[in-house]
Image: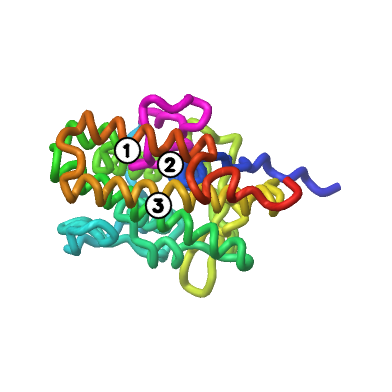
Amino acid sequence: MPSPAPNRRRLPLHPLSVCAGVAAIFAGSGSLRGQARPSSLPAATLPSSSQPATVASARSADAPPATSGATQPGTRPASQPVYTLATPRETLKYFAAALRDGDVQRLRRAVISGGDADERMVTAIADMARALATLHAAAKETYGPDAAARFTEDTAAGFEQTLAKIDAAEVVIDHDAATVRYPDDKDHPYELRRVGEEWKVPATQFTQGVEPPVLERRIGELTVQTRIVIDMAREITTGKHKSADAAGLAWRSKMMAALSGDLPGSRAATKPKGQ
């Protein structure tokens, strides 16, 4: 008699949590570092806060080489390690770094797509990651690092915690499949696949149990939220909001309008016919 399938987590795809669901694979926490989090929004619409990381030594085979890179949002920061897709653990770090940097091409490279909907979902996640990186940079430059935390979390500190969790994870390889279990969440394994010489994450890890119309709606909602993030970054950069307090009020107002369906293309506008 075949053994039962492992209890694999179905990642959430509600407003403001698509990116959080993706990050749950890489940090075991369900929280995206840098995820937008207006403080006045209802808790049910926000990603959960991250859990403390347990630091453990990385396996020597997964240790990344160090190199330098670019410094702007959407590219790798200077003097940061370069991660590859050579091992499952390296792939987890590769994806986490791409989320931190908002690097669209690196995010796409690390995912196995199963079709058009998967491609658009990954694109939406990548666009949001890049927008959040841009917003964080704009707020930090204009108002300072403390004020920037009102708009996005501390991406550098969050990334270090993510790396610690990945280093502490148990990785079991069986031919072209790898199973990842985090110490504080061993009942919910995650799966990676080897494609040629590279390890990647199947897009189905993000969408298990999600009906196509629901996925389409969530992609539309994330697209609207991304546009709001981009607008806020531009407004901050051009000096429209003279203080972090003023920018914070505008930020919360925009996000609340999107969640309530008051903006063009928001929840009501992105709802598929018949839903």
Give amino acid for label 2.
Ala
Q: Which residue is mark 2?
A: 27
- Label 1 sits on a secondary structure element that is helix
Q: Earlier in the sequence, mark 3 or mark 1?
A: 1
Name above or below for residue 52 compared with residue 236: above
Tag 2 near tag 1, CB within 8 Å: yes
Furthest-bottom residue in this view:
196
Task: State the extent of the magenta-drawn residues as a range.
Answer: 27-52
Q: Earlier in the sequence, mark 2 or mark 3?
A: 2
- Label 2 sits on a secondary structure element that is helix
How is colour applied across the structure in the image?
rainbow
Q: Which residue is mark 3?
A: 227
Mark 3 against mark 1, which lies toward the viewer? 3
Q: Is residue 274 left or right of residue 74?
A: right
CA–CA distance between discs 2 and 1? 8 Å
Q: Is residue 36 magenta?
A: yes
- Label 3 sits on a secondary structure element that is helix
CA–CA distance between discs 2 and 3? 26 Å
Instruction: From the viewer's side, name the closer residue of 32 and 39.
Output: 39
Q: Which residue is mark 1?
A: 161
Name above or below for residue 196 compared with residue 60: below
Mark 2 against mark 3, which lies toward the viewer? 3
Give amino acid for label 3.
Arg
